[in-house]
Image: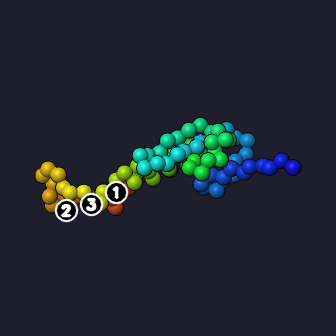
Amino acid sequence: MAAITIYTCVCGVQKKTSNHWVLAKVTSHGVTFMPWDAELARSRDITILCGEGCAASMLSRSLGDWKKPVVGVTSVGSVTDISAVISAEEYELAVA
């Protein structure tokens, strides 16, 4: 009997025959989006996304991660007052 692989998006939707699914690879340097490839989708470091909406949400979250303050960095230049550093909680991204 042949094994059937069921692909599931991070939002819980299971893949059927549609071809608009996207793959993403998240690294410390950012997110890379790729077109659907069944072989690549089996990799542990690949995130399966059901379409443009989930891909946009992942991109938005990764951009939000860029805003987090870096810990352990000595101030450079004229910024010496900690109140001049803006925390990540003060900003929000809106997804239309």
Residue pointed to by mark 3? 72
Q: At label 2, which amino acid type do we have? A: Ile
Which kind of residue does numbered mark 3 sit on?
A: Gly
State the image coordinates of residue 90 (x, y, percent, origin top left).
31, 60
CA–CA distance in space, label 2 to label 1: 15 Å
Q: Say left or right for 96 vs 11.
A: left
Instruction: Estimate the x, y position of residue 96 in percent, counting from the top left.
Output: 47, 47
Q: Nearer the viewer, residue 88 or 26?
A: 26
Q: Which mark is residue 68?
A: 1
Q: Is 24 left, or right, of 76 in this rendering?
A: right
Q: Quadrant of residue 80?
A: bottom left
Q: Under tag 3, what secondary structure?
A: loop
Question: Does residue 20 appear in the picture of this structure?
Answer: no
Q: Residue furthest right?
A: 1
Q: Give the residue type that dot 1 points to.
A: Lys
Q: Earlier in the sequence, mark 3 or mark 2?
A: 3
Q: Is residue 48 above or below residue 20?
A: below
Tell whether 43 sits left or right of 91: right
5 or 22, nearer to the observer = 5
How crowded pointer 2 is (Cα within 10 Å; few <14, some 14-19, many 20+) is rated as few
Give the number of the disc on residue 82.
2
